Image (cartoon, helix red, strand yellow):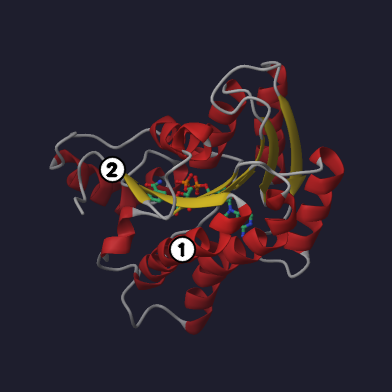
């Protein structure tokens, strides 16, 4: 018998090759969960899996693009084969896109919406049968402070606003199946998404300097919030957005 907030739970994390997704996977394992990890970055997702197994945890990795038409079904078949049920689904994978409204081509818009909004819906839909087998299913969607609307990222902000509304709808529809759904809204977090984009990095440094907690967040600080929402400690919490952003957005 394992110990920890997620003892003996089966947790699926998308976008687990690096950044926030990797931190969530490592933290969930440290809290006793068995992990199913996926990402289009095969090497990265295998490294996360190896790190978990090296520390004595249990992890299985499947590489693939979430937006591929057959992928959600394939993922659910593999989770069923490995673990027979799913307790926690973390829809974390996402991409940024910056530019003026005019610079958002139809292709750029569609790509961001496909990865950040449509894929989480289709994966959630594909996982319902497995989540229903859990006594206490939980979905945690990674949204963003961008739900408030920022300049130069209309597709990204729309996708994050969409996933937040989707989370609230899922909470209403799935409660009768003992499945909770919540969102975590990170502020600026020091991951490749921010640090490898010079404009976003500069914006992040400027913005976070003016926050009550005067720094960017660490991926592990997002992971802690996800773990709590996913755990039975949050058994009466559903349909909520938890902002983990250094005091940036106050709702
Ligand atoms: N870093 C931040 O400041 C920040 C702030 C708010 C919200 N977020 C959100 O947190 C989540 C994780 O962000 P991060 O900072 O760790 O980003 P990241 O770019 O470091 O990692 C994202 C991961 O998702 C994977 N991914 C992207 N598209 C995919 C696809 N089509 N199929 C499979 N895998 C795919 C990437 O390979 C990568 O491993 C995202 O949803 C992001 O929008 C991040």
> x, y percentage for residue 66?
66, 60
Compared across the picture, whether 195 is left or right of 49 comes to left
Q: Nearer the viewer, residue 138 or 39?
A: 138
Q: What mark, if any, has residue 151 been given in the picture?
A: none
- Camera-side residue of 76 and 68: 76
Q: Is residue 78 above or below residue 83?
A: below
Q: CA distance from mark 2 to mark 1?
A: 18 Å
Q: Residue at x 27, y 47 (%)?
A: 204
Res 173 → quadrant: bottom right
Question: Residue at (51%, 56%) from the top-left corner?
Answer: 94
Task: Please report contact status of discs 2 and 1: CB closer than 8 Å, yes or no.
Answer: no
Find residue 101 and report its horizontal and vertical position in percent: 33, 79
Residue at image position (42%, 45%) is: 237
Disc nearer the start of the sequence (2/1): 1
- The residue that disc 2 covers is 245
Residue 182 lies, in percent from the top left, at: 45, 51
Residue 214 in sight? yes
**Image quadrant assignment for residue 149:** bottom left
Q: Residue furthest right?
A: 81
Q: Could you say which disc has been placed on residue 163 in the image?
A: 1
Identify the secondary structure beneath mark 1. Answer: helix
Q: Is residue 141 visible?
A: no
- Give the percent coordinates (x, y) of residue 20: 48, 40
Q: Secondary structure at mark 2?
A: loop
Is residue 244 rendered to the left or right of residue 155? left
Q: Residue at x 49, y 74 (%)?
A: 108
Picture quarter with the C terminus: bottom left
């Amino acid at each position: 018998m394992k110990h920890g907030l997620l003892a003996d739970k089966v947790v699926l994390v998308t976008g687990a090759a690096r950044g926030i997704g990797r931190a969530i996977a490592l933290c969930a394992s440290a809290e006793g969960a068995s992990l199913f990890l996926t990402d289009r970055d095969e090497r990265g997702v295998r490294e996360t899996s190896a790190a978990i197994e090296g520390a004595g945890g249990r992890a299985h990795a499947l590489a693939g693009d979430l937006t591929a038409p057959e992928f959600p079904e394939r993922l659910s078949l593999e989770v069923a084969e490995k673990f027979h049920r799913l307790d926690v689904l973390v829809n974390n994978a996402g991409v940024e896109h910056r530019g003026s409204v005019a610079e958002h081509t139809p292709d750029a818009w569609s790509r961001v919406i496909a990865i950040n909004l449509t894929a989480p819906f289709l994966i959630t839909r594909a996982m319902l049968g497995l989540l229903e087998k859990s006594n206490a299913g939980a979905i945690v969607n990674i949204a963003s402070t961008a739900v408030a609307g920022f300049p130069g990222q209309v597709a990204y902000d729309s996708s994050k606003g969409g996933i937040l509304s989707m989370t609230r709808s899922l909470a209403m529809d799935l409660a009768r199946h003992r499945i909770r759904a919540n969102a975590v809204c990170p502020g600026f977090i020091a991951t490749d998404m921010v640090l490898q984009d010079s404009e976003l990095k500069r914006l992040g440094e400027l913005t976070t300097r003016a926050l009550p907690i005067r720094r960017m967040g660490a991926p592990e600080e997002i992971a802690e919030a996800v773990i709590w929402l996913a755990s039975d400690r949050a058994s009466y919490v559903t349909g909520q957005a938890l902002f983990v952003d250094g005091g940036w957005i106050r709702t």
